[in-house]
Image: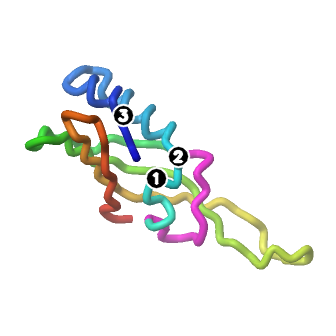
Amino acid sequence: MIRLSKTLSAWQTSGFDTALKEEIAHLDADLLPLQQGLSRSSHANTDKLSVMVISAVDAPGCLRVKVGLFYTGIIAGCSCADDPTPVDEINEYCEARFDIDKATAEATVTLLRN
């Protein structure tokens, strides 16, 4: 479950973007659609996640926030000792929407496009 209480508390303040970015960065990466958002690699690497706030709208019952997620992925080889394929990180980007319930701060995340 995703709970973004600091983000909800910071709504309509100058600290909103910062609160959202920090809370998303501290989430368990498995809760984010990073693997589904891959477009150039086969495995999401979540060590270097960066968040960009694209838009935030006050919708009935929730805050609807669109974000860009920057991260890296790798093309996994066979993992053999003599595999000549280097493990290079490839930059990845996808967009997601967070719907944050105004009463509970519980959030759902939906992959929009990659």
Which residue position holds label 3? 20
Neighbour tally class for label 1: few under 14, some 14-19, many 20 plus, Cα within 10 Å = few
Q: Residue at x 58, y 56 (%)?
A: 72
Callout 2: helix, strand or loop?
A: loop
Q: Position of residue 80 (x, y in %)?
A: 86, 77
Disc 1 residue type? Leu
Residue beneath the point at 33% across and 30% down: 5
Residue drawn at (32%, 41%) of the image: 53
Residue 39 spot, x, y in % from top left: 48, 70
The residue pinned by badge 1 equals 31
Q: Quadrant of the C terminus?
A: bottom left
From the image, tell me which residue sits under label 2: 28
Total marks shown come to: 3
Label 2 close to label 1 by CB (< 8 Å):
yes
Q: Is residue 13 above or below residue 101?
A: above
Q: Nearer the viewer, residue 40 or 112?
A: 112
Q: Position of residue 7 (x, y in %)?
A: 32, 30
